Amino acid sequence: MIKSIWELFNKEDLFECYQCARCTGSCPAAMVLNAYGPREVLLRCLNLGQEAVVGDERIWYCTTCNVCEDRCPQEINIPELLTAIFNLAAQRGNLPEKIKFGVDMIAKTGRSLIVNDKVLKERQKLTLPALDPLNIDEIEGILKKTGLNEMIELS
Amino acid sequence: MMRFAFFLGCVIPVKYPGFEKATREVMQALDIELVDLPFSCCPAPTNMKLAHYDSWLALAARNLCLAEEAGLPILAMCNGCINTLKEVNLILKQDVQRRQMVNEVLEGSGHQFKGTIEVKHLLDVLYKDIGLDRIAEKVRHPLTGIRIGCHYGCHLYRPPRLMYPDDLSEASSYVPVSMDLILSTLGATPTQYSRKFLCCGSALGTNIDAQPANEITREKLTQMKKHRIEAVAVACPSCFSQFDRGQMMLERKHHDGFGLPTLFISQLLGLAFGLDRANLGLGDHRISLNPILERI
């Protein structure tokens, strides 16, 4: 379990931010959603603390395109900060259903999408190799050791 | 003959098996041997990494170990897969503490990460390993005159610090060119457009809300139309879905009438090579390909 996002991101790096907003200016999510922007997330982390951001559902508007890191003149690893925020948010139960579904599928089958008969028939028609079930005991064993189940409540 | 461990990922073999077929056929034509291994989900930089970083690291490491044990470099055809596998490969090669953590986790299943292989995207295998000359030799039906806009997809090259550490300019920036050059080799006219390096919006749609994600795609499509682009080329199934299915959803809402066919890079290679069209997944599209197919 993580107690703080600062276990995954060096807080001092945030002090380099002078709020120039190049990140938000280049952010695709901010382009279409006024309520979102990496600059604002950084500012709230600095001024209000992590609790002000990990409960906010809007953090999940991020497309994970990483352009914020590309553009930051201070070379702050913004995606790494966001990943730390996402991880703690997920642990607290702030995790979109669709992401939870994907993670759940991976934990149960090793794949993030369902392989049903229709898929297998389509593949057979194309003479593609069958998608055999994976060694799920092995994958479960790995995820048990990393503690995925303690971190996130899966269905 | 070059051999690669073929990393299918989750989206292509399930949603777009035709792209997998096209890739296998194209690689066979180029004398590349693809080996299937029991890989799991990469896992995606848009779900597992955000939910639990260490689980993401460990599962990716298991995939890397399978390829290491087979002594093969990995060829992946999805940007999500390449982002995870390249990043984790580099992290575990450089970060002793994380490598120790992961190897302790993997011990029970008999794997140990050693850092002996490379991970490559299909585009880089085509451009760097096979080379444009060998691709040119295979062209039977050049895509002459077709104005194609490349969408590389963010996870292919961002952050370049991790994705292309050896190709950084002095300004630490990196702009991908492989797909444009491949398309030129196929005889097409790769066409530049504003917002070429804007994200397609996919993860926002698949994780939270399709509507704003499609608006990002709409901005790109608008710019492509302005530059008289006739088709979009992609190298990722998530970007593909965003342009193809997203366009259909946008049409219902805005009636823009873009009608821009989207093609996966292997399909364009297969068409130019004159491979059997039944093997190129041409039926996997929501936006009609006919305006393009009629001209090849």
Image: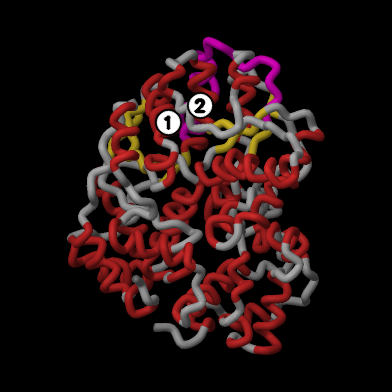
Find out whether residue A111 is within the magenta segment.
Answer: no
Quick check: B259 left or right of B43? Answer: right
Q: Nearer the viewer, residue B168 or B135?
A: B135
The quarter holding residue A135 reads: bottom left
Quick check: B20 left or right of B164? Answer: left
Q: Nearer the viewer, residue B73 or A62?
A: A62
Rendered image: mark on residue A33 = none
Check the residue under mark 1 and report the chain it is in: B
Q: Amino acid at mark 1?
A: Gly
Tell me what residue is drawn at x 53 percent, y 46 percent.
Answer: B238
Q: Amino acid at mark 2?
A: Gln
Span colored in magenta: B125-148
Find out whether residue B134 is within the magenta segment.
Answer: yes
From the top left corner, tell me how far across and down residue B137 is, in percent: 50, 13
From the image, state whether disc 2 or disc 1 is nearer to you.
Answer: 1
The quarter holding residue B262 reads: top right
Q: Nearer the viewer, residue B178 or B269?
A: B269
From the top left corner, tell me how far across and down residue A103 is, in percent: 39, 64
Q: Which residue is mark 1?
A: B18
Check the residue under mark 2 and report the chain it is in: B
Asked if residue B149 is positioned above or below residue B155 in the image, the reply reads above
Tell me what residue is drawn at x 39 percent, y 62 percent.
Answer: B92
Which quarter of the image is occupied by the C terminus of chain B?
A: top right
From the top left corner, tell me how far across and down residue B34 is, in percent: 32, 32
**Helix, strand or loop under label 2:** helix
Q: Disc 2 or 1, which lies upstream in sequence?
A: 1
Q: Which residue is mark 2?
A: B267
Quick check: B152 left or right of B110? Answer: right
Asked if residue B34 is positioned above or below residue B157 in the image, the reply reads above
**Helix, strand or loop under label 1:** helix
